[in-house]
Amino acid sequence: AGGLRRRSTKPVWIVPPGSCSRVDKILCPVDLLEASSHALRNAIHLARRFGSELTVLTVVQSLASYYDMPSDPNDVSPHSPFLKARLLEFDRYLRGFDFEGVNWTKAVRPGKPYREILKTARENDTDLLVMGSVGRSGISRLLIGGVARRVAQRMPCPIITVRSEDPVQLH
């Protein structure tokens, strides 16, 4: 599934064995980049169609934690200029989407993105995770790793990964 997920321009829906078929809660983690925008449009569309609750999550990561170094908790404290700037950026980003008819909330968590996505999905009893995937390969995949890959490896629920495709159309 990893190779298909990485190479496909179409959304890929990965379902672990024994998953339920209801989609009451959707989690869409975003990093404010293009793949996340495509994923969020898909998540909004699916939430509207299924009548699901949607949580839009962004993870604020300090530079030190990006490199797995001990970090200063003040880097992402509620009073840090870095976090305040990130929250303003997140709010501006979200204004670019049409949430009409969708019961949604936003969430911001500090930490490593893949860990916080998995943690949030479990805590919220998420039924479907919709997330962007850059689809790295080769040396950049080895050096940087992929958040979508790491989340898919630990699949807490069914996942739709989106690279560049416009929203899923359900009729």
Image (cartoon, rainbow, N blue to C red):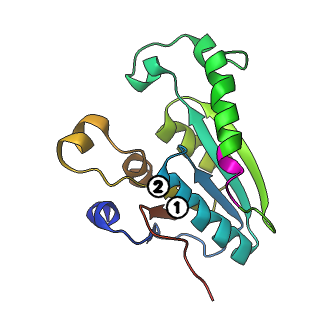
Instruction: Give residue 133's quadrant in the image.
Output: bottom left
Which dot marks residue 23?
A: none
Instruction: Give residue 49's quadrant in the image.
Output: bottom right
Residue furthest to the left in view is 138
Image location (x, y in percent) of residue 163:
41, 61
Q: Residue at x 32, y 40 (%)?
A: 145
> Compared with residue 18, is residue 113 higher up or lower down, i.e. above or below?
above
Q: Residues within 10 Å of mark 1 (few under 14, many from 20)?
A: many
Question: Are the residues flagged by discs 1 and 2 in contact, CB closer than 8 Å?
Answer: yes
Q: Residue at x 37, y 51 (%)?
A: 149
Label 2 SS:
helix
Disc 2 marks a residue whose amino acid type is: Ala
Q: Quadrant of the C terminus?
A: bottom right
**Depth check: 117 or 44 in front?**
44
Residue furthest to the bottom in view is 171
Quick check: 159 left or right of 49? Answer: left
- Do we see residue 94 in this rendering? yes
Disc 1 marks a residue whose amino acid type is: His
Q: Residue at x 66, y 17 (%)?
A: 81
Q: Residue at x 61, y 50 (%)?
A: 121
